Structures are given as structure tokens and as C-alpha cells.
Amino acid sequence: MGAVVYALVDVDAMYVAGERLLQPQLRGRPVVVLGNNDGCVVARSVEAKRLGIPQGERWSRLRRDPRYSAAVPRSAHYALYGDLASRIESVVEEYSPDATPYSIDESYLTLPAARATELAHRMREQIATWIGVPVSIGIGSTRTLAHLATRQAKRTGGGIHNLAEADAEQRLLLDSTPVEEVWGIASRLADRLAGHGVSTAGSLSEMDPGRARRIHSVVLEKTVRELRGTSCWPLRPESVPRQQCRHTRQLGTPTCDPELLAAAAAGHAHQLARKLRRHQRRADRLTVQLTCGHTSLEVSQGLPRPTYSTPVLVDLAVRLARSLPRPGHSYHQLGLLAAPLRGVEQTTPLGEPARTVDERLSHALDEITTRYGTEAIGFATTGLRGRSPWQPRQEHLWPVSTTSRHLLPLVHG
Ligand SMILES: [Mg+2]
């Protein structure tokens, strides 16, 4: 095999692209995507950025500001974005068997060096035609350099930037890139580096790797080596099994009502158990946490035997949630934590079936919801039918048909 280079595929403004894909009327308009109970802006279109709408701004403030009256709100639709991400991933995988998703809108892969630019152009066009979202692709001899190349591709608007082709150009880009734009360099570390006379990616690449390790960590040492073109972070490193699993959400309406909190805990436990089954991990202990302003309360209890069963976790979450609230407080967030976790093989007693009866029931639930949608079946404790007050507000949610067949448009003949 010839030399390979790393490429990073990054969707341009993923959430906005997802909304525009199904609502072409949003093209060219200042779109803001609202997360967390429609509370604040989590993504902005270029037009919204141009209007000066800040990331993280509260919607309640934004909607009253006459400067932003043109802003079009949409509630974040994570199921849609996840669906798009997996479609993009399936295209990226065609180009390299080692393609690895890094976040919901980024994937790394390796490409043969000699054909990298040509393949990147083809991949970008294929994603635009098949899925309908714009991506930028950066190419470099290491993942850190590919990351810098992607930023440059976005900045120039060219869509693709290959840093592995011209050394002189790479040098120029490194020297003009502030060090905090390097992959993995947070602003506090950047401040510390400034104290050592390092303010650009170029000056970081010239630092002695041993010194980088001494003043910070082995991670910084690897970053220095990666900027020099030595790959230190290969794709698909040995995966470490999950040690904990969390499900935390804002409540649609702040409350102190133990029954409402119990319903929310049941709904969260259902999601948490699904996640555990997906990762083939069983929980030893469950913690329920309620948050009110800056203070939170929590209670936890061990499980009689490690499990990922939905009924067992729902039952425990409900009992714990009922025991927690203090009168006079209004809780706005409820979180569940399953930890420590254990592997499925490790927790099946010798001579016993691999799954308990209620674990088998849980797998049957998964099959039903995969086939008929998440609202097809559930536990009465969650108040599934209709919207319960604990469920997050999504007043600006646009119905889309890629994630649920209940949302398919009806055609009357
Ligand atoms: Mg992106």
C-alpha cells in the first residue's frame, strides 16, 4: 500500500443544514436552532451570524429584540441530525474501511495520498447529491493537520483543502494560525503556552516535544509531533468499554410534584436502559439527580444484580425520584446516572441463561420501537400518550419524515 493521508469530513452548520434540507424555504434566511427546552441558540446559519445573533443567546430575549425580528426559530431535532449523520457516515465508509465518526458532524478517514484531493471532491459531491448537505474536507499527513486544513477549507469557502501536497503552504498556514485553533488546545492551555512564547501553530510545532510533555502532558507532546507530520493518533484505537452512562434532560415545566418527577424519571430510565443495551453493559448502581438553580440533590442505590432491564431500572428510578423533592423547590432538570457498569459476559452467572426474563422483555421492546416508532409502546408511569408536562418543550419543531413514519405526509387521492 502506498502512503496514506488523513482526511476530516465536517458538515457545514450541521443543524441548520438539516433543517434546510426538509424546508427549502429556509435557505438564505437567518435560521436559529434552539436547544434545551427551546431555551437558547445552539446553532446559527451564516445569515443569523451576520445579523449578530450570539451563540447561546436566550430565545426569550432574542424574540423581543427588534434587531433580530427576521430570525426564524426551529427546535433542535436531534433524531433528524443523527439520521443525517448516519447517512453521511455510510457514504464516507465507502471511501475507506477505517472511517471513524468523531462527533455528530465530523468523521476522520484515511485516503491514498496520491488520489486524496480527487477522492475528496468525489465524496463531497456524492454527499451533496445523495444527502443534500454541504461538507468541508481537510486533508493532512496527520489528524491534527487534517483538522487545521478543514478550518482553512471553511474559511476560504473552497470546500476542500489539502495540506499534504505543499510543504511551503503548510508552513504559512501554521504560522498564521493562532495556537488555540489547533485541535485539542483549549483557551487555558493557550494562555499557558503564551507564557512560553508560543502563540501560533507554527511556534508550537517548533517546541521541543520533551519540553511540551514537561510543561503540560504527553497529549501536548503528541500534538507537537502531529504538527510536524508524525502521526500519533491513528484511527480506531483500542476502544475502552464504557464505565458509566448518563441521561440528563431539562424538564418541560419546572416542578416539585413527586408524581411528575417520577414520570420523568421513568421516561429517562427507559432511554438509559436502551443505551445500556446498545453498549452491552449492565448497571451495578443507579443515581437520580434533581437540579434547582445551582443546587442539586441526589440519591443512589445498588441493584440486586447488574442489569440493563428497562422494568427494573424504571422501577428503581421512580422510587428514588419520589423520595427526593423538598417542598417549596422547583426542579428544572432531572438526571440519571448508571455507574459502575459491567460487561454482559462478566455478569452472567455460570449455568444461567444469558438474559433474565425482564431483559428479554426489554429486547422485545427495542424490536417493537425500532419497527413501529418510540411511541408505539411504553410504560404507563411515563405518561406516554400525549405530551406530559415533564417532556421538554419543542414549540418550534418542524415535523420531518426521515425519523418517524408517523410524520410522513399524507397524500389524499
Ligand atoms: Mg461542522
Image (cartoon, rainbow, N blue to C red):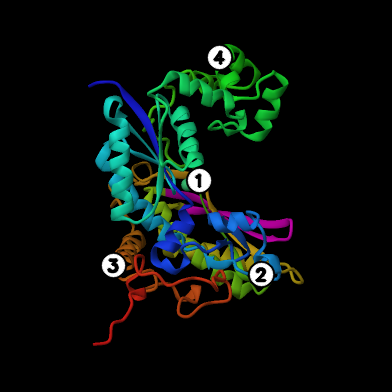
Q: Nearer the viewer, mark 3 or mark 2?
A: 2
Q: Nearer the viewer, mark 1 or mark 4?
A: 4
**Residue at (28% x, 67% y) in the render:** 371
Mark 1 / mark 4, whichever is N-terminal: 4
Q: CA distance from mark 3 to mark 2?
A: 39 Å
Look at mark 2 in the image and give the residue it sits on: 63
- Mark 3: few/some/many CA within 10 Å (<14, 14-19, 20+): few
- Mark 4: few/some/many CA within 10 Å (<14, 14-19, 20+): some
Q: CA distance from mark 4 to mark 2?
A: 50 Å
Q: Nearer the viewer, mark 4 or mark 3?
A: 4
The quarter in which the N terminus is drawn is top left
Tell me residue 141's x, y (percent).
Answer: 40, 24
Q: Nearer the viewer, mark 4 or mark 2?
A: 2
Q: CA distance from mark 1 to mark 3?
A: 28 Å
Tell me residue 325's x, y (percent).
Answer: 69, 67
Give the left or right position of residue 292, taking residue 140 as reference.
Answer: right
Residue 185 visible from this viewpoint: yes
**SS at badge 2:** loop
Mark linked to residue 371: 3
**Residue at (32% x, 72% y) in the render:** 405
